[in-house]
Image (spheres, rainbow, N blue to C red):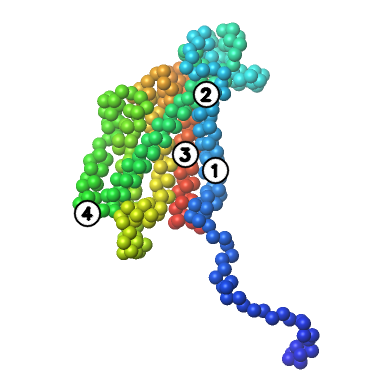
Amino acid sequence: MTQNLKNLPSGSFDRVTVDSSHAEKIAKPSLSFWQDAWLRIRKNKAAIVSMIILLLIVIMAFVGPYLSPHDGEVQTITHANLPPKVQGFENLGFMDGFGILGGKEVDLYEMKNVEVYYWFGTDGLGRDMFSRLWSGTQISLFIAFMAALIDMVIGVVYGGISAYYGGRVDDIMQRVVEILYGIPNLVVVILMILVLDPGITAIIIAITITGWIGMSRIVRGQVLKHKNQEFVLAARTLGASNNRIIIKHLLPNILGIIIINTMFTIPGAIFFEAFLSFIGLGLQPPAASLGTLINDGYKLIKFQPHILLFPSIVLSLLMIAFNLLGDGLRDALDPKMKD
């Protein structure tokens, strides 16, 4: 064997040298926390579909009222209780303007000499349901986002202060939380609605007056978990102030939990607003929201089901999409769920 190696030409082999600078080279590109979370949420098809649905609903909430040629606030009594009719759908058997009258299916548009199209029909006062639906969705989304934002701010501040300073401060603040938590939420909301004039401001205050408690408890638990860890003790040893420790060290580590719980708070606020408006404690006519539209449709469900159908579909899509997106964000932002 040795003899055979000596007979090989001198250029048969290349010398291999080891470069120590490549010893710590990482084959996979380094990703930040948010880049990694985005890559993981992209793999969740339900979360991506929910994100697209929510984006479309939000866009339609602002653009929809301008797409219809009819003003949702204008009352045209001669056009009252018309079924949906879309141009070009007359021969397809749906959204063709036909309705039940006296047990027979008739073209209500032709009977009332209506030459315009109402895509989602009209209500009992002849108002365009397409414009009212998207205007009501806009109001419901505004109430939900404002309530969730206020809940997040109050809950994070309250829970963070309670956990970080601890001791007597924590005891006093948690007793206040326990008192508020022991009062039924609906009772507090009804009392606030009775004290304040019914409207958007009253609903937001009613939802947020106890809605921040859940967020504060979660933030308190996370701050208690992180405040005695090594990186916080190191920052305190180096002379970092309390504000800097909270903002630079604690808050970034619990930001994912805050986002996830906020995403679950929004559909709860949407449903609660719809519930209050449905039972007559929320927005009052002629103001439109998903709750008031569902309440109007419920009264006429036997004769004009389209008035109930479209707001119910939008409300259901919002609830399902926000919850699925919240599940996707929880899987993406929780390090324990990482493969």
Which amino acid is tagged 2? Answer: Pro
Tell which tag, 2 or 1, sits nearer the viewer.
2
Residue at image position (29%, 53%) is 164
Looking at the image, is mark 4 or mark 1 earlier in the sequence? 1
Relative height, residue 216 to residue 313 (above, below): below
Residue at image position (39%, 38%) is 148
Percent from the top left, x then y, of residue 172?
21, 47
Which amino acid is tagged 1? Answer: Ile
Relative to residue 166, is residue 4 drawn left or right? Answer: right
Q: Secondary structure at mark 2?
A: helix
Residue at image position (57%, 62%) is 28
Question: Which residue is denoted by mark 2 in the rendering?
Answer: 65
Q: Are marks 4 and 3 in contact (CB under 8 Å)?
A: no
Looking at the image, is mark 4 or mark 3 earlier in the sequence? 4
Label 2 to label 1: alpha-carbon separation: 26 Å
Residue at image position (27%, 31%) is 187
Label 2 to label 4: alpha-carbon separation: 54 Å
The label on residue 271 is none
The label on residue 322 is 3
Q: Secondary structure at mark 3?
A: helix
Instruction: Answer whether residue 224 is visible to the viewer in this image.
Output: no
Percent from the top left, x then y, of residue 135?
48, 25
Q: Nearer the viewer, residue 64 or 183?
A: 64
Label 4 to label 3: alpha-carbon separation: 37 Å
Looking at the image, is mark 2 or mark 1 earlier in the sequence? 1
**How many numbered discs?**
4
The label on residue 48 is 1
Question: Which residue is denoted by mark 4 in the rendering?
Answer: 167
Instruction: Answer whether residue 48 is visible to the viewer in this image.
Output: yes
Label 3 to label 1: alpha-carbon separation: 11 Å
Percent from the top left, x then y, of residue 228?
31, 60
Q: Nearer the viewer, residue 149 or 108?
A: 149
